[in-house]
Amino acid sequence: MSTATQQAYEVVIGLEVHTELLTNSKMFCGCANQPGAPPNTNVCPVCLGLPGALPVINQRAVELTAMTGLALNCSISEFTRFDRKNYFYPDLMKGYQISQYEYPIARNGWLEIGHNGQRRRIGIRRVHLEEDTAKLTHRVDPVTGRPYSLVDVNRAGVPLIEIVSEPDIHSAEEARLYLMELRTILQYLGVSTGNMEEGAFRCDANVSVRPVGAHELGTKVEVKNMNSFRAVFRALEYEAERQLAAVARGERIIQETRGWDETRGITVSQRTKEYAHDYRYFPEPDLPPLSLPPSWTAAIRARLPELPAARRQRFAEQYGLSAYDVELLTASRAVGDYFEDVVRHFNRPKMVANWMTGEFFRLLNAENLDISQARITPAGLAELLALIEQGTISSRAAKDVFERMFRTGEPAARVVEDMGLTQISDAAALERLVDEAIAANPKSVADYRAGKTQALGFLVGQVMKASRGKANPGLVNALLRARLDSGE
Ligand code: ADP
Ligand code: ZN
Ligand code: MG
């Protein structure tokens, strides 16, 4: 047996994420940035790559890239430049992609993930700006059986940033956490929708293995074609296992690109890896280099919103919420903003958190809605919670009221009135129901008096039922006890 087979190996992963920017127009022309529009409707000579057409830099895209860099704790370059990356593929209209090579907008940052109760920093190597390619759709002619491909140029020239991590990730789970955190940051910044299924957030993974304690990296395999977080996770688990098994057999890993096959659940060799020199990078002659002075960067930094990590910490401290509630309420900026808006009107953070993570999220999920699409306003929810607090309605009834407010956006008081749900907290009105319950259930009364106190719960239930849920349960309880204990 060779020593290699006895040695323990670790997995090393570096991720390259491409994300489409939420700008109005494309990267180098005035076409609308709407990749989902009817095919080939947002096109012009520049993004079609017609000879003689000249690109112009989208300033907003540069700003969004710098924001992303700052949010990822990077340094922003004072000098940055675009380069041509040359290759041939039917989705590349010009025969080259305008990208950045030696002088990316941002570099040397980090992002923190929490894993196994520990916080860990994953290095960010660079964040650069480039343009997306056209979209190919591969089909098979149902009559002839011949394959063909369709080209949609709407996506060509859409601003794209690439975020390259250091090879600091050591498991599929860490990769998943990194991607989730990165996506949340991009969403907080308003840089990207982060929608992976729609292709607005894409990830390629570089995977290698090496003996534990070794300093050099092992030969890496690049894994592509993963279209969901789950796919990334499964592909990395598979590829790590494949490489560990190979080295355990004494085999060498070869540098190659492998594609994730979702149905078979395996990675498949696609091609041996190309090298940077194959792309013949050179400075883009049609665009000026940019200088980004520190004053410009400082102005961008000053406009950054509160980021997920800071908000999580503040929510825990300021509102005393559980880690679970904090996680749910900071998952998106809109949810956190909504929560704080409700609390401004009704200062009971835990009660607000319970209602939001319970009833509210249940209905949002059931209807597959985003919180921004909900009809119930923060002030409306605050009003409803105040009615519960004052004892005007029971928590049980409030759920029905909430459901109707969720659908219609009507004010709480009106719904309560309309549904006839105002809680009966008037002792005189309840006495009659209490009397009826006692008269109708002599066995329970006898049980209670014989010391079986659980019989009280049954009697409370009977009164609640008779009131159609509107009686104030606390008051019913007190009235029943008083009557039973007095022996009348
Ligand atoms: P390339 O020139 O092939 O694009 P880079 O050095 O630019 O390679 O790295 C691309 C990505 O691959 C980065 O995320 C980096 O962290 C990761 N990476 C580089 N080498 C390895 C390796 N041996 N194992 C795992 N990931 C790696
Ligand atoms: Zn165009
Ligand atoms: Mg690279």
Image (cartoon, rainbow, N blue to C red):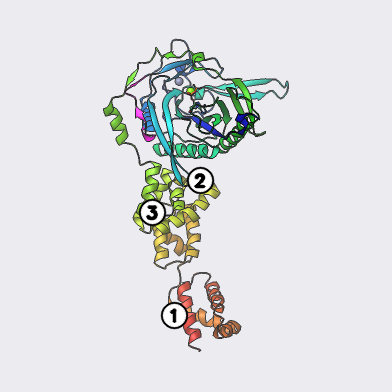
Q: Residues within 10 Å of mark 3 (few under 14, many from 20)?
A: many
Instruction: Verify whether residue 77 appears in magenta.
Output: yes
**Secondary structure type for disc 3:** helix
**384 or 482, nearer to the observer:** 482
- At 44% from the left and 80% from the top, the residue drawn is 428
Residue type, numbered disc 1: Ala
Residue type, numbered disc 2: Leu
Q: What residue span does the magenta drawing correspond to?
A: 70-80
Residue receiving disc 2: 369
Residue 195, how many percent across, how many down? Answer: 50, 36
Residue receiving disc 3: 342
- At 69% from the left and 23% from the top, the residue drawn is 141
Residue type, numbered disc 3: Val
**Secondary structure type for disc 1:** helix
Q: Is mark 2 within 8 Å of ligand 2?
A: no
Circle 3 or circle 1, nearest the eye: 3
The Cα atoms of the two marked residues, 3 and 2, are separated by 19 Å
Height in image: 367 above or below 97?
Answer: below
Residue 408, how many percent across, how many down? Answer: 47, 53
Q: Residue furthest bottom?
A: 488
Whether label 2 touches label 1, CB < 8 Å = no
Residue 219, how many percent across, how many down? Answer: 55, 24
Residue receiving disc 1: 428
